[in-house]
Amino acid sequence: MKKRGFLLAACTVGVMLSGCGSRETAFSPSESCVYVAKDGALSSALVEQTGGISVDENELKQYLETAVIHFNEEKGAGALAQNQKNAERLPAALKSVKAGKDTVTAIFDYASFEDLKAFGETNDNEDTSNSLTALEAKPLSEAIADGWFSEGELVKADGSEAGTDTVQNEKSGMAVRSEGGATLMVGGKVLYRSSNTELKDDSTVSLPGTGTAYVIFKR
C-alpha cells in the first residue's frame, strides 16, 4: 500500500474479494481531518474519492477492523476494533465506515494523540492527511494557568484582534495546542485562534505546516 491512500487500498482489496457513520455528535466530516470533542477526546476521519470504484461497505469495514486490531495488539491492548462500554479506551478504535457513491469515509477514535500519530504511521495505514507532531487539548482555564498564550498571539475567529483580557474572561472553553499541519474540526464554535491559522467554517480550522498553533472553542 506504499504511496496509496489507506481507504483506496482497502477499496482495491474489496474489488478483488467481492468484484467490486460519523461520530454521533456534530462530527460529520466532508474531508480528512482530526477532531477534538468537547471533552478533549480525539478522533480522525479519512475521506477519499472512489474514482468510480464500487465499494462493498462490509468488506471495507472488515479490512479496517483487521488493521485496527493489529495495531491494538501491538500496543498490548485487546484484539478489538471498537471501544466497549464502561471499558478503558482502546489505543485506536474504528468508529464508523461509510461507502458512498463517490467517497469512502472512515472515522477512528483514539486514547491519546500518541496513538493517533502512531496509527497514522503504520504500514497498514500510512495516513498522510496530516503532518501533526504534537496536539494537546485541555479546558481553557487550565491552558491559561499553564501559560499557553502570549500577548497578541490570538485573534478572534473572524481574524480581528483579541486582547489577552478578553480571552481570560471567557467563562468556558476548550483549548487546543498543536504543531504541524492538519485540518482540525472541533466540537463547538471556534472562539479564538492563532493568527497563523485559517478559519474554514464555524468549527473547522486549517493548521499551518510549521510552528505552534492554538484554537479555542466553545464547550
Image (tube, helix red, strand yellow):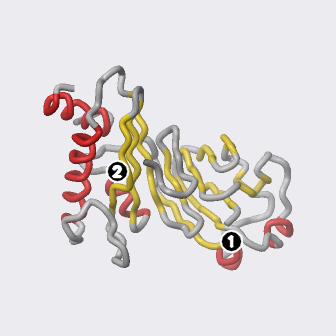
Residue at 16% x, 31% y is 18
The three-letter amino acid code for the residue at tag 2 is: Gly
Q: Which residue is mark 2?
A: 120
Q: Residue visible at 20% across and 34% down?
A: 14
Q: Can you name the residue that lies furthest to the left here?
A: 17
Quadrant hosting residue 140:
bottom right
Q: Position of residue 49 (x, y in %)?
A: 40, 28
Say which of 98 and 189 sits in front. Answer: 98
Residue plotted at (60% across, 43% down): 206
Q: Secondary structure at mark 2?
A: helix
In the rendered view, does 124 fall on the left or right side of 158?
A: left
Q: In terms of depth relative to the viewer, which is nearer, 131 or 219?
A: 219
Residue 139: percent from left, percent from top: 64, 73
State left or right for residue 213 relative to residue 123: right
Q: Is residue 161 above or below residue 30?
A: below
**Callout 1 crowding tier (Cα within 10 Å): few <14, some 14–19, many ≥20:** many
Report how far apart the C-alphas of labels 1 and 2 lie in the structure.
28 Å
Looking at numbered disc 1 in the image, what kind of residue is underneath it?
Leu
Quadrant where the N terminus is found in the figure: top left
* Image x and y of residue 121, in percent: 31, 50
Q: Callout 2 environment at 10 Å: few (<14), some (14 to 19), or many (20+)?
A: some
Question: In the image, is 54 to the left or to the right of 131?
Answer: left
Tell me the residue that label 1 is attached to.
Answer: 140
Where, by quadrant of the figure, is residue 40 drawn?
bottom right
